[in-house]
Structures are given as structure tokens and as C-alpha cells.
């Protein structure tokens, strides 16, 4: 005679604590994430084949804008967030608003600002971001000023130019490719 089967007791798992933890983690990551600062001026950067990832912190970006009809190119300097820009004299608050805008610099002021930030240990890398329509003389004067003041390591920001591969249907040896 067969032994009688034991009735299984249904197990119920309360998922409420799991959902609470998921939402707490979501709120934590959303509140601690640092978002990239919006660009103050639109700069169309040139393209290149080089690929080098810039660090998130510890750099100052020198931006050279394209000349406009009624004005020359502007030279702006920014760091990774607006609070550091305000604190170190790289930006100012527009009167009557809370908007932060960059302060234009001339080439002679650049080394003093960068050396001050290096003394505070805020900057260890100089990055040059120039518009493709900016005058060569302006970019050259910025680079010469940096070089005269022993700021010789400068990274240039460019767009990555994608290589065009044309499929001719032939293999590298000149024979037709097989599929």
C-alpha cells in the first residue's frame, strides 16, 4: 500500500521589502550622480583620428570660440563644475538671475589663473577646445603663452572621425571575397 502524500503548505514571500530597497538604491544613485555641466558656448570642434579619453576631474578647459561678425574670438576657461568656476573667478552670476556665465580672458591672464589653480591642487591637466572656425593666430597665441609659462602638456579636444571602409567585394589579396 502506498504511503499517503503529505500536503504541501504554500509558501508566500512578501516582496514589499525588496521593492523598498530597490527604490532606495535608485534614489541614492540619482541623488549622488554628478551630471555633466552644460556647455556655455557652442563650439564646433575639428575632427581627428586620435582617441584619448579625458579624465572627469582635475582639468581646466580653455575654450576658443569662433569670431562673430561684430566681435573677435573669445577665450573662456572652465572647470568640471560651476561652483569651482565661481569660486576661482572663472565665471560670474548674471545680475538679476541665477545663471552663471564665463568670463572672457586674454592670453596674458591664462598662466596666472592656471598656476593659481595648480597651487590649490585643483588642476593637473590643461585642455584646449577650439572652434574649427577660430582664427589660427588666436589658438597659436594661447599655445605660445602656455609654452612660455612651462605648461607644455596640452590636450586638444576633437571629434573622432570615423574611418570609411569601402567594400569592393575583393579580399585583401585581390581575389573576390567569399561569403
Image (cartoon, helix red, strand yellow):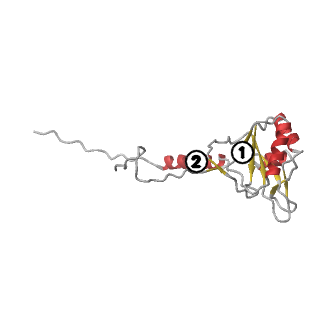
Label 2 crowd bin: few (<14), some (14–19), many (20+), radius 10 Å: few
Q: Which mark is residue 156?
A: 1
Q: Position of residue 142 (x, y in %)?
A: 82, 45
The residue labelled by disc 2 is 24
Q: Is residue 88 left or right of residue 20?
A: right
- Nearest to the observer: residue 129 or residue 118: 129
The residue nearer to you, when weighing 152 against 87, is 152
Q: Is residue 134 visible?
A: yes
Looking at this view, is 37 or 40 the one in front?
40
Instruction: Specify whether 61 is left or right of 113.
Output: left
Front residue of 17 and 137: 137
Residue at screen point 17% across, 41% down: 4
Estimate how packed mark 1 is, as few (under 14), some (14 to 19) or many (20 or more) residues with alpha carbons within 10 Å.
Answer: some
Q: Is residue 37 above or below residue 154?
A: below
- Using the numbered discs, state the Cα–Cα distance from disc 2 to disc 1 in whole angstroms: 41 Å
Image location (x, y in percent) of residue 103: 85, 53
How many numbered marks appear? 2
Judge left or right: residue 26 versus residue 9.
right
Amino acid at each position: 500500500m502506498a504511503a499517503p502524500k503529505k500536503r504541501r503548505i504554500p509558501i508566500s514571500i512578501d516582496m514589499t521589502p525588496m521593492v523598498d530597497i530597490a527604490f532606495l538604491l535608485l534614489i541614492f544613485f540619482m541623488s549622488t550622480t554628478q551630471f555633466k555641466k552644460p556647455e556655455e558656448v557652442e563650439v564646433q570642434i575639428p575632427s581627428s583620428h586620435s582617441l584619448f579619453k579625458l579624465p572627469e576631474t582635475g582639468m581646466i578647459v580653455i575654450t576658443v570660440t569662433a569670431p562673430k561678425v561684430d566681435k573677435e574670438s573669445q577665450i573662456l576657461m572652465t572647470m568640471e563644475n560651476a561652483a569651482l568656476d565661481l569660486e576661482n573667478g572663472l565665471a560670474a552670476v548674471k545680475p538679476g538671475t541665477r545663471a552663471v556665465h564665463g568670463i572672457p580672458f586674454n592670453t596674458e591672464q591664462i598662466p596666472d589663473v592656471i598656476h593659481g589653480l595648480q597651487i590649490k591642487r585643483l588642476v593637473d591637466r590643461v585642455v584646449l577646445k577650439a572652434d574649427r572656425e577660430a582664427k589660427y593666430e588666436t589658438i597659436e597665441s594661447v599655445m605660445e603663452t602656455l609654452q612660455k609659462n612651462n605648461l607644455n602638456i596640452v590636450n586638444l579636444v576633437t571629434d573622432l572621425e570615423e574611418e570609411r571602409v569601402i567594400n569592393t567585394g575583393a579580399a585583401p589579396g585581390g581575389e573576390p571575397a567569399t561569403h
